[in-house]
Amino acid sequence: MTQNLEQSVREAIQSQVLVSAEDQILLAVSGGADSVVMSAVIRRIQQDKPVCRGLAIGHVNHHLRRSESDADEQFVRQLADQWNLPVLVRSVDVGAQRRSHKQSMETAARQLRLNALMDMASQAGCSRIATAHHADDHTETMIHRLQRGTGLRGLCGIAPTRRLDNGLLLIRPMLGITRAEILGYSRQHGLSWREDSSNVSIDHTRNRIRHILLPKLVRVAPRLGEQLRELAGHCRWFQRKVEDECKRIGPQVVQSRQTGQIFLDRKIIETLPTSVRVELIRQALVELGCGEQNLGIQQFQSVDRLICGPAGKSRNLPGGFCVRTDSASLILALRSAEDSRPAAADDGVELPIPGKVTVGRFQIESRILSRDECDLKDFLKTKPATTEWFDFESIVPPLRIRRRRPGDRFVPLGQTEDKKIGKFLTAQKAADALRRRILIVEDARQILWAAPLRINDSVRIQSQTRRILEISIRPIANPPA
């Protein structure tokens, strides 16, 4: 058992080139059996025939189980001391992350844990972070993805390596080893570990798969785990081909990148194979900051249908993102920036700075003022509702004036979160006549003003404002026919 398991890990490290002699590895140790065995095995390999420059241990205390979590931390510190390895520890507030980002407990903990590990690795001078994902984790992950709905990328399972945002490499040297083998190794070597009481709960989907669904499946298909790993290997091979094609065609497909938005050429992308289209969309969403945990096959299918459909359609995606089409582009964007696009000729008019334009029965004028020559308090007391001041440095020209559209969003002055303008009007108890007269003033990034009611909080006059953009809207007595 000892020789086979250690040999399997060494072979994985060498065949998959997980580390080099110059690397320092941060071993992610929770205190559970999996991470303890991984660390023990890599330490023995390193003592026998070094595969890297050195090792360190990293532990994240999530404080989710109170005294148990603190006991886990103490156990890991003692283990590192016993093995004469440096140890780094980080504490995270999962509850606060969950509330502020409106995430599930699992997602919040996973993101905080990864961020903490990256921070510790950088501090310790490590270029690799090793985690103890094993063969059973791989099987559970694939079943979880199949249950949720997945495509080709999801069927690739857990990859042996993953390049992180800060350039570090996450490595998983235990993917070919089962949980039973891990427990056998720990007993053979007299290793102790901490049991996480939450692992036996079936409140979470993954635990229900582990404790209820998977045992039943294995009774019917004893080789299920091995077969899913083989399938994942084939899918990874094909996925690499898809990614190579995306790298080749991508520069032709991406029309432009703006703040919070990416524009893809509809005419080109609709001619591509579905797998390539989906991967290009996935890459664009990830570039915008959309977590892949939020994206399933249903979301990608929804976006894919938009590509070949009529212009002017839109879909909201999880995590505050959206996708829209116009005649030339597929636009992937943060919802807070969903209206910050170059508009079509019939989609409003451009407002010069300074200058004037006419929209229906209104004339809109803009001009630049010096803050030194302006009295903000006096302006706020005497200004009409149809005139507003903005921090000019916070604006990204060009400006456009248009009518309100369904789904328009902005952050009303004095608030911190974006709202649909329709809901804002309802909260303000705006009369129907006023709703019909609302004009939207937007720059290349966001809505500046739902005129004449409220400006966007992000462009308000601040203490550091030096130049002021003034926009005035005046009715025309005899508008042109």
Image (cartoon, rainbow, N blue to C red):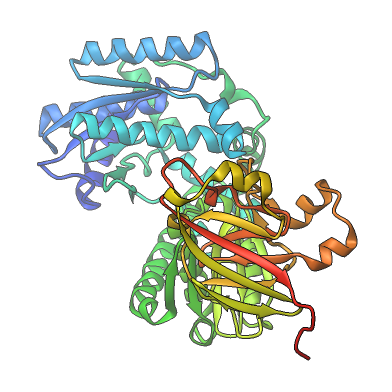
Residue 284 placement, left or right of 125: right
Image quarter in which the C terminus is found: bottom right
The percent coordinates of residue 82 (x first, y second) are 23, 11
* Above-or-below relation of 66 to 253: above
Image quarter in which the N terminus is found: top left
Residue 228 placement, left or right of 215: left
Residue 291 placement, left or right of 164: right
Residue at the spot x=33%, y=78% of the render? Answer: 248
Rendered image quadrant of residue 179: top left
Considering depth in this image, is 3 or 298 the residue closer to the camera? 298
The percent coordinates of residue 218 (x first, y second) are 59, 43
Residue at the spot x=37%, y=11% of the render? Answer: 75
Rendered image quadrant of residue 6: top left
The percent coordinates of residue 144 (x first, y second) are 59, 47
* Above-or-below relation of 176 to 310: above
Residue at the spot x=21%, y=40% of the render? Answer: 127
Considering depth in this image, is 329 or 157 the residue closer to the camera? 329
The number of numbered discs placed on residues in the rendered structure image is 0
Residue 238 placement, left or right of 228: left
Instruction: Determine the residue located farthest toward the right in the rendered image.
Output: 432
Can residue 298 be seen here? The reply is yes
The percent coordinates of residue 37 (x first, y second) are 33, 26
* Above-or-below relation of 258 to 27: below
